[in-house]
Image (cartoon, helix red, strand yellow):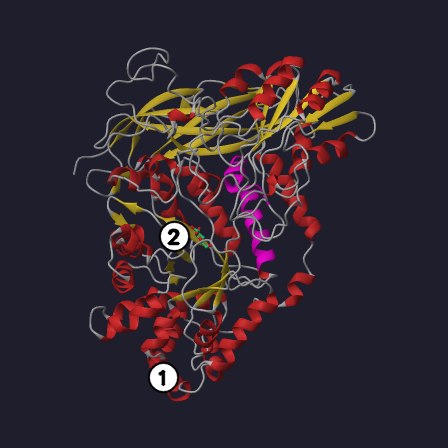
Amino acid sequence: MKKYTLLIIVLFYGGFLALGQNSKILSSVKNVETKVDSVLALMTLEEKVGQLVQYNGSWDLTGPASELDNKQKEDNIKKGLVGSMLNVLSVRATKEAQKLLMENSRMKIPMMFGYDVIHGYKTIFPVPLGETASWDLEAMENSARIAAIESVANGINWTFSPMIDISRDARWGRIMEGSGEDPYLTSMVAIAKVKGYQGNDLSGDLTIAATAKHFAGYGMAEAGRDYNTVNLGENELHNTVLPPFKAAADAGAATFMNSFNEIDGIPSTGNKNLQRDILKGVWNWDGFVVSDWGSIPEMINHGFAKDKKQAAEIAIKAGSDMDMEGGAYESSLLELVLEGSVDEKLIDDAVKRVLRVKFKLGLFDDPYKYSNPEIAANISYEDHKKAARDIARKSIVLLKNENNLLPLKPGVKSIGVIGPLANDKDSPIGNWRAQGEANSAVSVLEGIKTAVGRDVKVNYALGTTLGIGERSFLMPLEINTTDRSGYKEALEMAKKSELIIMVLGEDAFQSGEGRSQSKIGLAGLQQELLEEIHKVNKNIVLVLINGRPLELSWSSENIPTIVEAWQLGSESGNAIADVLFGKYNPSGKLPVSFPRTVGQEPLYYNQKNTGRPSSDLHVTYSHYTDVKKDALFPFGFGLSYTQFEYGEIDLSSPEMNADGNIEVSIPVTNTGKVIGKEVVQLYLRDMIASRTRPVKELKGFQLLDLKPGESRIVKFVIEEKMLQFYTINKIWESEAGEFEVFVGGNSRDVKSAAFNLIKNKA
Ligand code: BGC
């Protein structure tokens, strides 16, 4: 305490001129909180408000720009009235912006530079939904680490990732950006990503601050329409939507971003219960919350605030700490405090949170730490590409492989590669591509040609175009092509080829923000082309490149082999070729249910039993009259070139005490002919509870490599914590009673057993 008081006095008398001169004293103090308090004590109210302002550096605009022109922005940076900027790219640009502030402002508090580094910076990894299909947490941590290194090399010290919104609706364009429908899997990915970006210590040289977004409920938009209303009850909010955010907070995510949507009539940006009570209160998280782009003034459109000033008041009171390009804090916070509508203590709390992250990043020690050109010089993009190929092939999901058409046999003489995405070098890069260059992916055609060498004849035909227009982040292709001029060539080639690889799916920008669709079939003429080719050659391997689950009912009935290859990033074509030719035995499993028809959406495996369940999928009024109610390809599903057989579950005991555990053992055998990797999944069901519980919930998984004929006993340990949920008492606790345990290679085909949780009555 003595040290703390002394530091304040020292900094105060020296600080009116420049914090910079005092940076040595600050550096010598180890305790971040002492430093934060010392700096705060020197700041004027105007400077404090400045820390809560974020400007766009006019690169990728994802919303309306603020009213300020560049000159006004520059002046405010010089005065030190800006806490951070987004979309300022390159070490040169961030250095210049930082210099403006450091050389002109009184307090010299460095800015943070944020950017949407969602699945890689320059080396592009699979879109997050695809990457999650690998279930390989180590590989996902690694891709985040590489993204962090490339970001640092380009002046960025803060990514607006991971996006951990649970989404159950394939119509929602941003489903590609998250980890799918399951809270447990998404939580595990959240932890891996935070670790990958931030390392063990945020002050490391190659680490950046992560952002858990969008807090909260954004993925549950009604009818899958982006930005739409969310109706989310307490049970779903706590048991489904919040767990990944809790995991990210516990993993030390430096920042959170709130969301555009409302929940039950309250826009998340103005939601005190979410931000102040839960995140900063119950979870005791000490980072800062940045608004989503303009989400503070958007509360006016929501009909929740009458003007920017009121929006600012609501947002700061609710716990939104920084205003992303909304201009509301900048224009109104000072006045709100001076007139007594907002307590300065709230501003102080927000500023302390921002300063804390800046100290942890090491910006006070060296404001130009992230503007160091030497880092770029030491990057091995070749190594990053190898990692991109590794995770890309692990992300591929084999959905169907009738007659073992795959892997392609060495004897194959001629392959016809057909489809608008077959030689497309851009779509695999996907949306939210940061600085991934347009047309920079290895196409499927290129990957195949490299893999086969000269012995196999590879023919290519476009068949049809995906759509018309220029591709861009702001304007996706218009996918209403009627151009059948390529059919003839494709059909003739199909007739002559031994085997067809058809590459269909989605344009790069067909999924992503603001890209919701009411239809999720193969867009344009792709379905028609597929059916035409099928008439002349049935030996078809359908390779899908897409960011969302597609409607594949016709293909699943008629096409012998289907490979879900997502938008796999820079090394897409090579990774796909690795799988097609058996260099990699596919091991991916779906992180999201694929519906039979779009009318089933939202669709998810962890649904409730309802009062009228039925084990018969064809009849009874609890189903649709025109389609089965379950998924075409369920959550957790994915085939291999080998087969895995599951024995029976053995429980170490039929009963478990709250302080004990139960060991679940199950033999898994590779009964096929090649080495393979299986994702063994553990699910639980709480049979009777104070709130109805889902029919199955993923609670664990293990990746298992097995040689042909090899058998292993897989073990999971069930502890009381895994049985907890947010109960009717509004706390996380377990309830005594019967639980079912399921283990299997997907959420549908499982072995089961049961046990009882015994709890002593208080
Ligand atoms: C998106 C955020 C993104 C931000 C900045 C918004 O439109 O919802 O996810 O981080 O823009 O680009």
Q: What's the CA distance linking mark 2 and mark 1?
A: 33 Å
Q: Nearer the viewer, residue 696 or 113?
A: 113
Q: Position of residue 127 (x, y in %)?
A: 54, 41
Q: Position of residue 707 (x, y in %)?
A: 63, 25
Using residue 314 as the reference point, say whether residue 409 is left or right of it: right
Instruction: Give the residue at x 75% y 17%.
Output: 496
Residue 628, picture quadrant: top left
Residue 371 visible, this orientation: no
| In this view, the mark in front (2 or 1) | 2
Q: Quadrant of the C terminus?
A: top left
Residue found at the far left of this picture: 762
Does residue 382 appear in this view? yes
- Residue 135 shown in magenta: yes
Q: Which residue is mark 1?
A: 6
Residue range corresponding to the magenta coloring: 125-151
Query: What's the residue at 69%, 31% (across, down)?
Result: 577
| Crowd band around label 2 with a 10 angstrom C-alpha radius: few (<14), some (14–19), many (20+) | many
Q: Earlier in the sequence, mark 2 or mark 1?
A: 1
The type of residue carrying mark 1 is Leu
Left or right of 445 in this view: 189 = left
Q: Which mark is residue 249?
A: 2
How many residues crowd around disc 1 within 10 Å: few (fewer than 14), some, or many (20 or more)? few
- The spot of residue 739 in percent (x, y) is 31, 26
**Whether residue 3 is situated above or below residue 588 in the rendered picture:** below
Seen from the viewer's position, the closer of residues 145 and 5 is 145
* Disc sitting over residue 331 in the figure: none
Name the side, left or right, on which 655 lies relative to 106. Answer: left
The three-letter code of the residue at mark 2 reads: Ala
Query: In the image, is residue 528 above or below residue 5?
Result: above
Q: Is residue 480 left or right of residue 424?
A: left
